[in-house]
Image (cartoon, grey):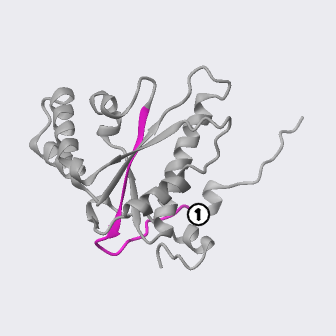
Amino acid sequence: MLNDRSSTLALLATRRSGRPREMIAPGPSGAELDEILTIAARVPDHGKLAPWRFIVVGEGQRDDLALLLRRALAAEHPSAPPAKHEKADEFAYQAPTLVVLVSAPVAGHKIDVWEQQLSAGAAAMSLLLAAHAMGFVGGWLTGWAAYSEFVREAFCAPGERIAGFLFLGSPGLPLEDRPRPALAEVARRWMPPTI
């Protein structure tokens, strides 16, 4: 069973992202989303910098997001085919809930920017796990919009970047697991170098 919530370990062992384009209502209520974001903020954060921000795109703001994506696509990819424009529109309306995660490293701090970016990634994963634990499904997407300067400026201050678009809702179709690497392919015991 995917996203098995019978125990914490069961959830971790069966966690599966959903496809945002297949998500349906209900999504988290306002109170549930606040709880999800509070949990997501409880990540390793060397230096207590909170080098990330969560930006909730409200249901009534999806038209504005679609317009932003259209303008970005026209400005940055003027020869994009109609299918790419259609996908941009679809992207804006996926899933009932959308949180844009911004990586906001504190420049010039003794904590390396890389560590701060890792903290942002941990916040995304914690957000997804909290959503799954509450019975929702989540999907973390990037794509061209996350790397668009036009889109970045709409969400980020200088020196910040979009770490991802986190879509939350209920699964509209049964979740399918994907192949996972064998443990031997991704883990090994350290062997000290011979001196």
Residue 26, relative to residue 102: is it above or below? below
Of all residues shown, which one is farthest toward the right? Answer: 195
Q: Position of residue 160 (x, y in %)?
A: 44, 29
180 left or right, relative to 168 = right
Task: Report crowding for label 1: few under 14, some 14 to 19, many 20 or more residues within 10 A (C-alpha).
Answer: few
Q: Which residues are magenta?
A: 161-182
What amino acid is found at the position of numbered circle 1 in the picture? Ala
Residue 109 position by quadrant: top right
Residue on which disc 1 sits: 182
Q: Is residue 154 left or right of residue 132?
A: left
Q: Residue furthest left?
A: 82
Most foreground residue, 175 or 34: 34
Image position of 183 (left or right of 126): right
- Quarter of the image with the C terminus is top right
Give coordinates of residue 174: x percent, y percent: 34, 75
- Image point 58% across, 63% down: which residue? 182
What is the x, y in percent for residue 158? 42, 23
- Residue 90 lies, with reference to residue 8, above or below; the image says above
Q: Residue at x 53, y 42 (%)?
A: 120
Where disc 1 sits, the SS reads loop
Residue sitting nearer the eye, 150 or 59: 59
